[in-house]
Image (cartoon, helix red, strand yellow):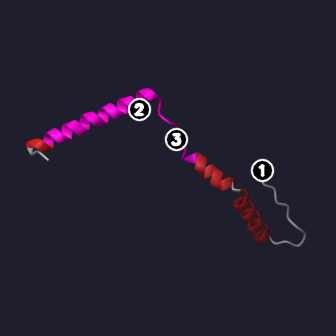
Amino acid sequence: MPIKVKRKEGETSSSLIFRFTKRVQHSGVLKESKKRRFHSRSQNRTKRLVSALYRERKKAEMEKMRKMGLL
């Protein structure tokens, strides 16, 4: 829903901008848009499984190198 602010008679442009910014902050429009901007979709089951297998493989590889004294 759009936010509308009409200029009152005798009101300066700076006070109009001030009223508008206050109304935008109070409505929560900016907060909601920032939250949606960085929202990431959840991965599907296959991608999660592949990622878990990769992590396990890397973990085992690092442990092997640590035991051999290469790390």
Q: Which residues are magenta?
A: 37-65
- Name the one closer to the observer, 13 or 2: 2
Q: Which residue is mark 2?
A: 48
* Residue carrying label 3: 40
Answer with the quarter of the image where residue 62 lies: top left
Residue 20 placement (x, y as % from top left): 76, 63
Amino acid type at circle 1 is Pro
Residue 68 drawn in magenta:
no
- Amino acid marked by disc 3: Ser
Name the dominant secondary structure of the magenta segment. Answer: helix
For image coordinates 47% across by 33% down, the residue present is: 43
> Few, some or many C-alpha atoms within 10 Å of disc 3 (few <14, some 14-19, many ≥20)?
few
Q: Quadrant of residue 9?
A: bottom right
Callout 2: SS: helix
Name the spot of residue 35 as percent of width and height, x first.
59, 50
What number is the disc on residue 2?
1
Q: Earlier in the sequence, mark 3 or mark 2?
A: 3
Q: CA distance from mark 2 to mark 1?
A: 40 Å
Sooner in the amino-acid sequence: mark 1 or mark 3: 1
